[in-house]
Image: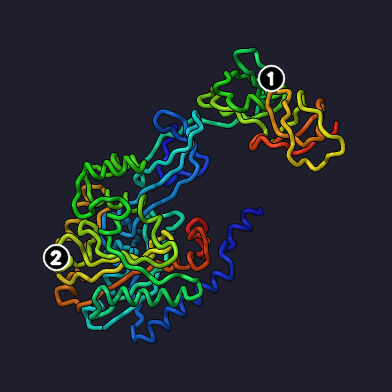
Amino acid sequence: MAVYSTNEFKAGLKIMLDNDPCSIIENEFVKPGKGQAFSRVRIRNLKTGRVIERTFKSGESLEGADVMDVEMQYLYNDGEYRHFMVPDTFEQYQADDKIVGDATKWLKDQDSCTVTLWNDAPLAVTPANFVELAIVETDPGVRGDTSGGGGKPAKLDTGAVVRVPLFVQIGEVIKVDTRTGEYISRVKE
Amino acid sequence: MDTQKSEWQSACSLELLRLRAQTLQKIRRFFMDRSVLEVETPLLGQAVGTDPNLSFFTSEYHYPPMQKKMFLQTSPEFAMKRLLAAGCGSVYQICKAFRNEESGRFHNPEFTMLEWYRVDFGLSELMAEVEELMALLFEHQGLQPTQRVSYQSLFQQYTGLDCLDFCYEDYVAYVQNSGLFDAIALCGHDHAVWLDFIFSHGIQPHLGESAFLVVYGYPACQSSLARINAENPLITDRFELFLKGVELGNGYYELNDALEQERRFDQEIALRERLQRPAAIKDERLLGALAQGLPDCSGVAIGLDRILMLLSNSPTIDGVLAFPVSNA
């Protein structure tokens, strides 16, 4: 695997740090006019999702991580593993809920999502930014209320619970932003 | 084709080009009013600064059959001091300076420097003049009056540590409590690197929120061309200027002892060798000038691109340059 010097650290570069694959978020070159140069780097650990800050002496280097994001189709859950497929090659991958993490509540069969592979094994799963899911459970709303003020909780077919406006009913399909977990709109069938 | 088309253009707005031109005019007027002489010295020199923390660019001078290695200057300091020793009086220069391996939000390897020397000025008089120039350049920015603080009390205030007495255990305890663990492996037992690390990570970002801050009295382990303070041999007569967490300039009461200067050069050249950094050639002509006699003077260098960044609220140095190194 390639080795990268701090001068090559750019947002998105994948490197190995403390034996974990990480992604560079931001790299700031810090140099007093008279003194030692440092690279102050914000790094996301791709296994834990945690963001940490580390400082390196300018010119130090780290090993690259074999990490890539691949668009896949979510196939099904066999109870232990969730299965994904690369549409072009039909290549399949499986990941347990620990790896799929929060994405579990947005994944519907056949939907596409991004699977992050590390040494060709799933490391994380990111759902599409917007998903369309059906409401399976919510209190009956007040007819005629279209303001959406206040709202009510609604359970979706994947198990996720989001706040929706009062006028939205069981059986309706809604569009949700998975990054914020917020209701966007109703989807006309 | 579109990317090629955009690459030849400047990312810097016309407004910023004008701001630069106006700023240069104001500076020239400021010095003209004070009878400080504008000078030009070579950017390409036969010797170069020995500071182990500065990397230089080299070039080849061909004039067959002669072939000579030349250095792009990391600062015009040595040549200006030779003029001072020749008796030119107070001088200033606006020029490009070149520092290899420096690139980032606040660094471009080629940048514009304003450097001036005042004969018969002590450090405090020069600090006052820097403050006057800044007040002129930033007159419409609504800043509070400039403040001065010693490095030692600033360090004490932010970290509780004594910057002049290197107690390893105390320094380690401080970084452990403030989450700056990397310092322990990076700094080892090198006091100067510890000070650089703690100052740049834990102190500098907070300096000069609403007013210029002048920090003076730097620890002696950190300055190669300043004089040791007459009353306290642990500090030097050096100051730095900060605004909004950005380091803008560095000033010295200039060392004028040729032997002491040569000793520091040799120390730095040895250190460069130990660190396996490219060899610097000691400026014998500067040493000759110092031996002849440098007048009592103080000097300061200001990064003009950073001044423009702050005047225009530009988050990056690239934003104030016609062409940063990436599309130079």
Type of amino acid at the residue the image marks with label 2? Glu
| Viewer-proximal residue among B26 and B123 | B123
Mark 2 nearby-residue class (10 Å; few <14, some 14–19, many ≥20): some
To which residue does mark 1 refer? A75
Q: CA distance from mark 2 to mark 1?
A: 76 Å
| Viewer-proximal residue among B83 and B114 | B114
Left or right of residue B282, residue A56 in this image: right
Examine the rendered structure and indicate whether residue B139 appears above or below residue B194: below
Please tell me which residue is depicted at 24% across the width and 61% down the height of the picture.
Answer: B223
Please tell me which residue is depicted at 41% across the width and 73% down the height of the picture.
Answer: B134
Please tell me which residue is depicted at 23% across the width and 76% down the height of the picture.
Answer: B122
Mark 1 nearby-residue class (10 Å; few <14, some 14–19, many ≥20): some
Q: Is residue B316 visible?
A: yes
Residue B234 placement (x, y as % from top left): 17, 59
Examine the rendered structure and indicate whether residue B237 appears above or below residue A47: below
Residue B314 placement (x, y as % from top left): 52, 62
Q: Chain of mark 2?
A: B
Residue A153 placement (x, y as % from top left): 72, 30
